[in-house]
Amino acid sequence: MSRALVPGWFALVALAVASLAAACSGDPGYNEDELILATTTSLNDSGLLDELVPIFEAEEDVKVKIIAVGTGAALRMGAEGNADVLLTHAPASEQVLVEAGDVTARTLVAYNDFVIVGPADDPAGVAGMTDVSAALAQIAAAGAAFASRGDDSGTHKKELSLWSDAGLSPSVESDGWYLDVGQGMSATLTVANQRSAYTLTDRGTYLALSSDLVDLIPLVEGDPKLLNFYSVMEVDGGKGRINHVASAAFSKFLTRRDIQMLISEYLLEQYGRPLFFPAAGETEESISARGGARTEVGERR
């Protein structure tokens, strides 16, 4: 054996010995007591996870560490192996991870819709419009303030796609009415409330925070383009110390019938309408085909 190969040889031997030692010690290769969940700030701001996660922790005897960031950041965490499970709402971007093998499963959990909210005096005159492209074009033509999350989140990605559908691409550099907040949904809604601006929000977060948003009301809704889908994804266990056991359990938990029922009933009595609709067993296509109308839990099984 040449001297040049000795260091590499010893490194391989050391790795094999370490792996054997871990196997003999019963080390599963990940932290059995913790599940790292990377999710979107809008879902976290709605409060739904505060209802669901403690149930899962009690059942599985595992601590869930919630990292609430924009969906773009959450997806990067998954691709880099820095989270065990993802709960996000950007179907096209999620599919990229599926095709790359970064996640081993992607399952639809729930949906609601996006809505354009704005000041009650509605300077752009978009109240009641159901064509979101026409409404955005009207806001731009009026030069009315619009607050964008600007944070590569699922909501930001949706907003950019909606502007594109309308044939527009506003920017802070060229459009004085376009505000780049660069923060989560709660902060963006607060800015819109303070600046009498329009913004795109998921309905769940808006309803959950509406008591503090006295100057914002829903103005544009009902376009099928505004449907908002949430999916859970299990990060590939080969990426490192991924708790793939708890990740699979969490995915199964979210799609369980009783948990789907809890999702459908979350804050329903308080707001008189659901913040989220259950979606386990469905596809984005089937929901879009009926325009997002609700079906009862269990009806799809």
Image (cartoon, rainbow, N blue to C red):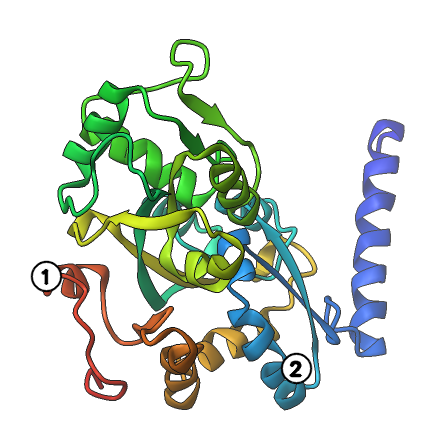
Q: Can you identify the residue that label 2 sits on?
A: 57
| Residue 86 visible from this viewpoint | no
- Using the rendered image of the protein, determine whether residue 53 is visible from the camera's viewpoint: yes
Along the viewing direction, whichever of 174 and 10 lies nearer the viewer:
174
Which amino acid, mark 2? Answer: Glu
Residue visible at 36% across and 69% down in the picture: 276
- Give the answer, above or below, for where 77 lies relative to 256: above
Residue type at mark 1 is Ala
Instruction: Tell me which numbered mark, 2 or 1, is placed earlier along the sequence.
Output: 2
Q: Where does residue 233 sit, x and y in percent of width and height? A: 46, 61
Q: Is residue 184 depicted above or below 25 in this figure?
A: above
Q: Quadrant of the C terminus?
A: bottom left
- Residue most extreme to the top: 174
Q: Quadrant of the N terminus?
A: top right
Task: Give the side of residue 192 with respect to residue 217, left or right.
Answer: right
Label of residue 289 in the image: 1
- The 10 Å Cα crowd at callout 2, few under 14, some 14 to 19, many 20 or more, is some
Task: Please report contact status of discs 2 and 1: CB closer than 8 Å, yes or no.
Answer: no
Up/down of 120 relative to 249, above or below: above
In front here: 155 or 220?
220
Spatial separation of the CA atoms under disc 2 and disc 1: 36 Å
Residue at 59% over, 85% down: 55
Kindly identify the residue that appears in the image at 60 percent across and 73 percent down. Answer: 50
Left or right placement of residue 5 versus residue 289 in this view: right
Position of 27 compared to 84: left or right?
right
Kindly state the secondary structure of the residue where label 1 is placed: helix
Where does the image place residue 218, in percent across and percent down from the top left?
31, 51
Q: Secondary structure at mark 2?
A: helix
Q: Which is more toward the observer, 274 or 8?
A: 274
| Image height of 275 relative to 117, above or below | below
Residue 298 appears in which quarter of the rendering?
bottom left
Q: Position of residue 45 (x, y in %)?
A: 55, 59
